[in-house]
Image: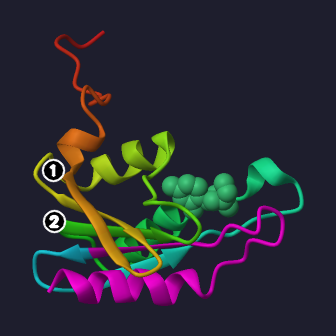
């Protein structure tokens, strides 16, 4: 079943707009009820304005109604296996749980499976003990 999420991430990667880095990335999320949302990285001539594949996928996920994310796949080429950048780990954590599975892929398939809890230990939760 996880292979279809890799396939969705891979299809998204083929749509990447990455003329500056020439490093296409694809990401796909599955919700508990089986919906899949995918995204690619989108770069901009003013480099810091570009954004990651995971962020595009999260935009589709929110617009598609959200829900509990149970699995995430990220894929890139020319890398043993891609791991989400720090900012995307925090964004993914916002909408997933520590047991959400994360498939780290190369262009041929899933190389390693980890959990979001393993990928972002001690992530910022925003929970404060006392109101100001
Ligand atoms: N990139 C992603 O899309 N996801 C990541 O988790 C890491 C980096 C993109 C951003 C940029 O377009 C390119 O990879 C090179 O950094």
Q: Is residue 6 magenta?
A: yes
The residue lying toward the viewer, choosing from 40 and 77, is 77
Which secondary structure, mark 1?
Answer: loop
Q: Is residue 73 magenta?
A: no
Crowding at dot 2, Cα within 10 Å, few <14 / some 14-19 / many 20+, comes out as some
Which x, y percent locates residue 75? 45, 71
Query: Taking the image as drawn, is residue 51 in sight?
Result: no
Q: Which residue in the protein does label 1 denote?
A: 97
What span is in magenta?
1-29
User: As displayed, is residue 96 above or below residue 66?
Assistant: above
Q: Quadrant of the C terminus?
A: top left
Q: Residue at x 53, y 67 (%)?
A: 53
Q: Earlier in the sequence, mark 1 or mark 2?
A: 2
Which x, y percent locates residue 74? 41, 67
The residue lying toward the viewer, choosing from 97 and 108, is 108
Q: Which residue in the protein does label 2 denote?
A: 68
Q: Residue at x 38, y 42 (%)?
A: 90
Query: Taking the image as drawn, is residue 111 in sight?
Result: yes
| Label 1 lies in ligand 1 vicinity (Cβ under 8 Å) | no
Q: Which mark is residue 65?
A: none
Q: Residue at x 19, y 10 (%)?
A: 130
Which x, y percent locates residue 111? 31, 66
């Amino acid at each position: 079943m996880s292979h279809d999420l890799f396939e969705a991430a891979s299809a998204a990667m083929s749509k990447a707009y990455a003329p500056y880095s020439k490093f296409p990335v694809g990401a796909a999320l599955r919700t508990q009820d089986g919906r899949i949302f995918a995204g690619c990285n989108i770069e901009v001539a003013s480099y810091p304005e570009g954004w990651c594949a995971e962020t595009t996928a999260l935009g589709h996920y929110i617009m598609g109604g959200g829900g509990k994310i149970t699995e995430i796949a990220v894929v890139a080429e020319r890398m043993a296996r891609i791991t989400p950048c720090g900012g995307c780990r925090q964004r993914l954590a916002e909408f997933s749980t520590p047991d959400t599975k994360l498939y780290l892929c190369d262009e041929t398939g899933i190389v390693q499976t980890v959990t979001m809890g393993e990928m972002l230990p001690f992530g910022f939760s925003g929970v404060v003990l006392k109101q100001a």
